[in-house]
Image (cartoon, grey):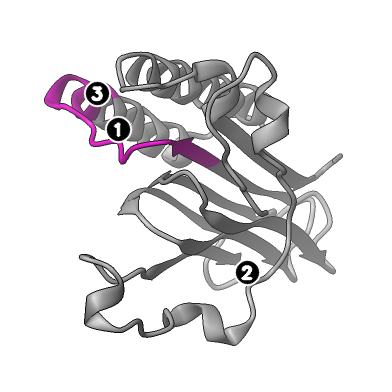
C-alpha cells in the first residue's frame, strides 16, 4: 500500500493510492540524512502481529486472539503485517476439535507523503479432522491522517471494551458461522470508534482516512 498525500481537495482519491504487498527488507531502517537537511530525521516503522491456534487429539480446543494498537506517529514509511492461522488436526466427528485464531490490528500513521505497505492474511486448515470447527480471522484497521493521531482516554476506553468482548467471544462455544457474524459486528464497532476519533482530528476525514482489511477462513464452510 502506498499513500502519496497531497493537500486536501474535493476529490481525496487524487492524494491516495492503496494496495497490498510486502515491504522490501530495507524498509526496516530509514535512510540517514545530514543534520542540516532537516530538523527531524525521517524514519520508518514496522509492526507484525500473528495469532496461531492448533487443536488436536491431545488438545481438543485451542482458541486465541490478539487486539493490538500500533500508533506510529508521523513517519515517511511503514509496514504493517497482520496474520491469523488456525489448524485442526487428527480429530473425528465423535471426537471433534475446535481451533480459533482471531487477530485485530489497529495501525495509525501521520504524514502528507507516507508510504505504507499493509499485509493482512488468514488461513484455516483441517488436517484429517472430520467434524472439526476451525476459524481464522484477520482484521486490520489502517488510519492515515495528515497529522499524527493520538487516541484520547475515551477512545482507548471504547477500544478496551471491544477487546474484552473479543476475548469472551473467542473463548465461547458458539458455532463457527455465528462466531464469524459476531466478530464482524465487533469489527464494525472498531471502525465506528476510529471514524469518531478521526472526525475530531485536525484535517481528519473519516470517509477516506480509515480503511479496514478483513480476511476470514474457516471450516466447516468458508
Q: CA distance from mark 3 to mark 1?
A: 14 Å
- The vertical placement of 50 against 6, above or below, is below
Q: CA distance from mark 2 to mark 3?
A: 39 Å
Q: Is residue 216 left or right of residue 56?
A: right
Q: Is residue 178 left or right of residue 131?
A: left
Q: Residues within 10 Å of mark 2 (few under 14, many from 20)?
A: many
Q: Secondary structure at mark 3?
A: helix
Give whichever of discs 3 and 1 has the lower sequence position. Answer: 3
Image point 55% across, 86% down: which residue? 26
Give whichever of discs 2 and 3 has the lower sequence position. Answer: 2
Magenta part of the chain:
141-158
Taking the view exactly as shown, the residue that stands out farthest to the left is 153
**Spot occupied by residue 185 in the image (x, y as percentages of width and height):** 55, 19
Q: Quadrant of the N terminus?
A: bottom right
Q: Is residue 142 magenta?
A: yes
Number of the front mark, 3 or 1: 3
Image point 42% across, 46% down: which residue? 111
Q: Secondary structure at mark 1?
A: helix
Q: Is residue 75 magenta?
A: no
Image point 51% across, 53% down: which residue? 114
Q: Which residue is mark 3?
A: 155
Taking the view exactly as shown, the residue that stands out farthest to the front is 36
Q: CA distance from mark 2 to mark 1?
A: 27 Å
Task: Look at the numbered discs 2 and 1 and tell me whether their residues touch, using CB distance below 8 Å.
Answer: no
Q: Which residue is mark 1?
A: 164
Number of the front mark, 2 or 3: 3
Amino acid at each position: 500500500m502506498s499513500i502519496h498525500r497531497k493537500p486536501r481537495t474535493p476529490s481525496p482519491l487524487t492524494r491516495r493510492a492503496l494496495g497490498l504487498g510486502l515491504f522490501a527488507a530495507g524498509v526496516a531502517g530509514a535512510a540517514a540524512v545530514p543534520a542540516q537537511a532537516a530538523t527531524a530525521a525521517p524514519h520508518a516503522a514496522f509492526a507484525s502481529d500473528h495469532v496461531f491456534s492448533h487443536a488436536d487429539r491431545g488438545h481438543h480446543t485451542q482458541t486465541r486472539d490478539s487486539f493490538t494498537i500500533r500508533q506510529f506517529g508521523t513517519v515517511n514509511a511503514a509496514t504493517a503485517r497482520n496474520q491469523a492461522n488456525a489448524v485442526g488436526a487428527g480429530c473425528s466427528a465423535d471426537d471433534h476439535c475446535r481451533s480459533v485464531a482471531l487477530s485485530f490490528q489497529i495501525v495509525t500513521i501521520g504524514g502528507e507523503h507516507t508510504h505504507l505497505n499493509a499485509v493482512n492474511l488468514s488461513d484455516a486448515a483441517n488436517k484429517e479432522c472430520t467434524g472439526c470447527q476451525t476459524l481464522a480471522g484477520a482484521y486490520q484497521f489502517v488510519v492515515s491522517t495528515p497529522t499524527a493521531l493520538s487516541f484520547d482516554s475515551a477512545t482507548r476506553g471504547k477500544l478496551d471494551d471491544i477487546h474484552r468482548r473479543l476475548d469472551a467471544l473467542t473463548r465461547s462455544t458458539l458455532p463457527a458461522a455465528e462466531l464469524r457474524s459476531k466478530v464482524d459486528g465487533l469489527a464494525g464497532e472498531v471502525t465506528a470508534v476510529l471514524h469518531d476519533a478521526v472526525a475530531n482530528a485536525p484535517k481528519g476525514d473519516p470517509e477516506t482516512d480509515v480503511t479496514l482489511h478483513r480476511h476470514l477462513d474457516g471450516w466447516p464452510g468458508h
